[in-house]
Image: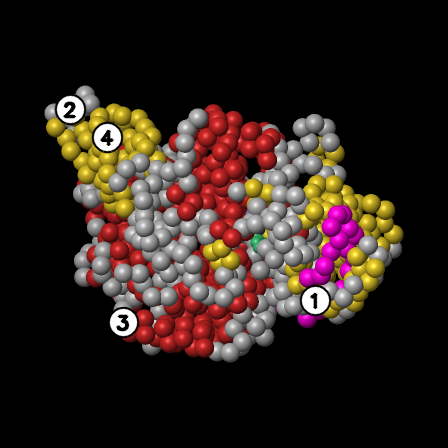
């Protein structure tokens, strides 16, 4: 289906570029507002491409001169690039352009952050640096010369000769332009080295600005070495350059970027110390370091043919980093966290107006497709593929993948071809996971008759604008059966659902079993299984699958919250009782018990109600959740003091899984206990805290019971010079504000002198926290929506990418009542009709506003 929006790109229109690039030489004369970039590019005709006009991308470039084979030319320049006649065979194209990094607030291309030069080229930023075929299927070997004032001058690949104010870099591995990077400025390195399996020595550096960050690099360095070793051991992948550089930058739109040999990281995704970072920060840093490192093979050596194939590198690399975290820490805990995240971010996307397939087939701005669907559902799909073919075939297929496609830019069909070749099994039905949008719903019916037990599954995926016709998918469903005493009578089996409806039979049972379905969350679907509270409580007590044991508790919590939000129902006693038993079980990992204590979020309850045809009321949902928390605190009151004592960490701080698990359980218990003692214990824990996890945990517990004013003020004074901690300070005040106070709190904080809204981390800390405060954002009078829209409009001209991404706060608007829909609709209209919208924001708002399919 082609829509009529101008500037839409379609997968079906793909054609290779008409030329190959033999080599690229770039020379940068750095200057904050007038940087000169000279390029020398050798092109030769690509015999596999249709005939076409010679076109190079280029945006906001001031052309100084251009030559072909040494002769000056006057190319035709448009807003999008450059065209000119070219010779038939090989030729040398040279250009000199001028750009203005200081004026670049969008943080794409070459920009300045605290006086440091920095680039961000994925997806289409290289065209803001020089004229070039800025598309991932054009791979080339780059040589880069940098001239600048003193300081460190970095680019991709291996370093060549350098002197004061001059450096040369050569990257021997052909790469697409989106992996180009340059960094220059006053930087210091935290250095180490790694010897690869084949004995090659690699210098490792984490570069930061001098003055305080140097001692926050050690953890990331350790994580990098663990990731390098893991990729050798598990995937047989070695690093392939003499140096691996990482740079921390404060102004960055995303988490981090895998530029070849020169990763650029958002400071928040690399810098860590026990005093300033939480356990969750440490875990996230380890995962992102690994993620970017793993891209060296899945993304850089083998890259995407076009941006529709983004999940080729992202889904696979998220899957790999999840395997890494599961190995380094606890596999069940990682799995549960990933599912929480999937439900919070991907399910709403897949079930709203922004739904798109894991491999989209059209877009206006590719920046808008760095989504939870491409990344997280993309990773789930790979997990499913691995379950379907088995671990051995998965390993063989990956070996074949690296051997067959190294150095190429490829498609999802290519990726699936190695699985087809290894298993001799056709995967065209599996391809639907990449081409259909929407979360499949799988409903289950049970039948038992004298020893024979039958499970019948029915699948359906609601159609959407992105996927009007839905066909059945291959769904891997892990099932185990439990006997009445909790014994596992049928251990986990992988069932393959391929039809709309299918039955599976188990014979020879001695009684009616309790089924444990979708173990380990074996497919990214919504399971509709109507079982009694008693059976859920039984699974909560006995399921041998840790994911499903947690899920049984979540299902009980979700259901009781749905009832409590729509009636004056009391909390389900089976749930409270079951939870108490789990919490008392000291054989269970504290991190796992902490997850058990986590209730589904308010927006998850809103979507669950909506799925049952009930219009969610944000105030009622918030009140219900508060009542359930109070009831939990009451039911567990007798256990909490002992739980606090048992999980207080007295050893020297370490961010490892065991210690952070205890702190997680400790802070979860502290939050509940604050509902009993009015925050007295939390206040003393706050005063005694010597690490950020406890400090922030105690502050959150205080704010949640309406206290913590003095602590909030003291926190600011203590940390005012630590920008990453101040981000937390902004966020926690808004996320823990009561619904009727969140908007006023946000209004006050945007007036704070430290609210530097052009910094994406700070903007997200404040406005992201507002969007995440479900009750506050959806405040009945619409003030939350209006404030949020004001700031989207403010940010858009300065930083379209971040502004557009944050529009997702409105994606679930159709689930709410008519009044709220009108209020949100008015804000969407206001944004849509305001002049000068970026293309990024215009696309997002148009998609969110689009009428619902019938
Ligand atoms: N490719 C980066 C990653 O997934 C994300 C990113 C995309 C960063 C676009 C910057 C810009 O690791
Ligand atoms: Zn990535």
Residue farthest to the top? 508
Contact between labelled residues 3 and 1, with CB atoms less than 8 Å apart: no
- Say which quadrant the N terminus sits in: bottom left
- Say which quadrant the C terminus sits in: bottom left
Task: Tell me which colouring the rendered structure shows.
Answer: secondary structure
**Residue 76: assigned label:** 1
Q: Nearer the viewer, mark 1 or mark 4?
A: 1
Give the labeled residue for mark 3: 818
Element assignment for label 1: strand
Query: Is 612 above or below relative to 33?
Result: above
Q: Nearer the viewer, mark 2 or mark 3?
A: 3
Instruction: Name which of mark 4 and mark 2 comes first in the sequence.
Output: 2
Contact between labelled residues 2 and 1, with CB atoms less than 8 Å apart: no
At a point 18% along the width and 61% down the height, the residue shown is 568
Give the labeled residue for mark 2: 451
Q: Magenta stretch: give its range.
A: 83-105
* The magenta stretch spans residue 324: no
Contact between labelled residues 3 and 2, with CB atoms less than 8 Å apart: no
Work out whether residue 501 or residue 182 is closer to the camera in this orientation and state it: 501
Instruction: Name which of mark 2 and mark 3 comes first in the sequence.
Output: 2
**Neighbour tally class for label 1: few under 14, some 14-19, many 20 plus, Cα within 10 Å:** few
Residue farthest to the right? 163
Q: CA distance from mark 2 to mark 3?
A: 52 Å
Element assignment for label 4: strand
Give the labeled residue for mark 4: 504
């Amino acid at each position: 289906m082609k829509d009529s929006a101008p500037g839409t790109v379609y997968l079906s229109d793909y054609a290779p570029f008409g030329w190959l690039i033999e080599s690229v030489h770039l020379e940068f004369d750095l200057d904050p507002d007038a940087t000169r970039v000279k390029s020398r590019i050798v092109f030769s005709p690509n015999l596999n491409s249709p005939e076409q006009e010679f076109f190079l991308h280029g945006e906001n470039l001031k052309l100084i001169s251009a030559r072909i084979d040494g002769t000056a030319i006057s190319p035709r320049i448009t807003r999008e690039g450059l065209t000119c006649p070219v010779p038939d065979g090989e030729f040398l194209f040279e250009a000199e352009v001028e750009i203005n990094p200081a004026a670049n607030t969008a943080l794409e291309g070459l920009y300045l952050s605290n006086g440091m030069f920095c680039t961000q080229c994925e997806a289409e930023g290289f065209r803001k640096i020089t004229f070039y075929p800025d598309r991932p299927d054009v791979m080339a070997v780059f040589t880069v010369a940098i001239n600048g004032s003193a300081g460190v001058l970095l680019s991709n690949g291996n370093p060549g000769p350098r002197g004061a104010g001059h450096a040369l870099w050569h990257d021997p591995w052909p790469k697409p332009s989106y992996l180009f990077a340059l960094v220059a400025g006053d930087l210091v390195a935290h250095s180490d080295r790694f010897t690869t399996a084949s004995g090659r020595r690699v210098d490792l550096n984490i570069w930061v600005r001098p003055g305080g960050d140097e001692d926050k690099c050690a953890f990331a360095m350790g994580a990098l070495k663990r990731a390098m070793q893991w990729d050798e051991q598990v995937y047989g992948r070695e690093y392939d350059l003499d140096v691996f550089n990482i740079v921390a930058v404060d102004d960055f739109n995303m988490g981090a970027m895998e530029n070849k040999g020169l990763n650029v990281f958002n400071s928040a995704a690399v810098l860590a110390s026990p005093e300033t970072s939480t356990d969750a920060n440490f875990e996230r840093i380890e995962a992102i370091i690994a993620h970017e490192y793993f891209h060296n093979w899945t993304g850089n050596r083998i890259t995407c043919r076009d941006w529709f194939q983004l999940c080729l590198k992202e889904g696979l690399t998220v899957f790999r980093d999840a395997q890494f975290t599961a190995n380094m820490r606890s596999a069940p805990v990682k799995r549960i966290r990933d599912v929480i995240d999937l439900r919070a971010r991907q399910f709403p996307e897949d079930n709203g107006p922004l739904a798109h397939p894991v491999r989209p087939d059209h877009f206006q701005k590719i920046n808008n497709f760095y989504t939870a669907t491409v990344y997280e559902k993309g990773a789930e799909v790979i997990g499913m593929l691995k379950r379907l073919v088995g671990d051995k075939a998965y390993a063989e297929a990956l070996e074949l993948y690296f051997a067959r496609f190294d150095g190429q830019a490829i498609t999802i069909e290519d990726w699936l071809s190695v699985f087809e070749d290894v298993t001799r099994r056709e995967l065209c039905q599996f391809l639907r996971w990449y081409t259909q949008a929407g979360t499949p719903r799988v409903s289950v019916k049970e039948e038992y008759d004298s020893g024979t037990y039958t499970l019948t599954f029915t699948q359906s995926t609601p159609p959407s604008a992105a996927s009007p016709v839905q066909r059945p998918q291959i769904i891997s469903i892990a099932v185990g059966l439990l006997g009445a005493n909790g014994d596992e009578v049928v251990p986990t089996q992988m069932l393959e659902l391929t039809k709309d409806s299918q039955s599976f039979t188990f014979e020879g049972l001695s009684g009616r079993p309790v089924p444990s379905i979708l173990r380990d969350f074996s497919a990214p679907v919504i399971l509709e299984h109507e079982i009694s509270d008693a059976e859920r409580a039984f699974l909560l007590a006995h399921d041998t699958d840790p994911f499903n044991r947690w899920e049984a508790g979540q299902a009980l919590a979700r259901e009781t919250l749905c009832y409590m939000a729509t009636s004056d129902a009391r909390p389900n006693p089976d749930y409270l009782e079951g939870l108490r038993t789990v919490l008392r079980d000291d054989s269970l990992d504290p991190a796992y018990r902490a997850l058990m204590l986590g209730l589904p979020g308010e927006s998850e309850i809103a979507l669950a109600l909506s799925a049952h045809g009930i219009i969610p009321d944000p105030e009622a949902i918030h009140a219900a959740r508060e009542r359930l928390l109070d009831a939990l605190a009451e039911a567990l009151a007798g256990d909490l003091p002992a739980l606090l004592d048992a999980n207080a960490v007295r050893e020297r701080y370490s961010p490892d899984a065991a210690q952070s698990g205890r702190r997680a359980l400790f802070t979860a218990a502290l939050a509940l206990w604050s509902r009993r003692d009015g925050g007295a214990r939390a206040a003393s824990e706050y005063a005694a805290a010597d690490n950020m996890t406890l400090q922030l945990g105690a502050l959150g517990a205080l704010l949640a019971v309406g206290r913590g004013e003095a602590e909030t003020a003291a926190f600011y004074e203590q940390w005012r010079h630590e920008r990453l901690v101040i981000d937390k300070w902004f966020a926690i005040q808004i996320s823990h504000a009561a619904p009727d106070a969140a908007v006023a709190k946000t209004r006050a904080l945007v007036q704070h002198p430290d609210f530097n809204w052009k910094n994406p981390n700070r903007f997200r800390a404040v406005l992201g926290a507002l969007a995440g405060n479900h009750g506050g954002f959806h405040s009945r009078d619409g003030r939350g929506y209006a404030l949020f829209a004001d700031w989207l409009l403010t940010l858009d001209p300065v930083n379209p990418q971040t502004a557009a991404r944050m529009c997702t706060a409105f994606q679930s608007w159709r689930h709410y009542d008519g009044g709220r829909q009108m209020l949100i609709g008015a804000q969407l209209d206001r944004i849509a009709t305001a002049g000068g919208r970026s293309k990024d924001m215009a696309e997002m708002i148009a998609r969110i506003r689009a009428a619902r399919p019938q």
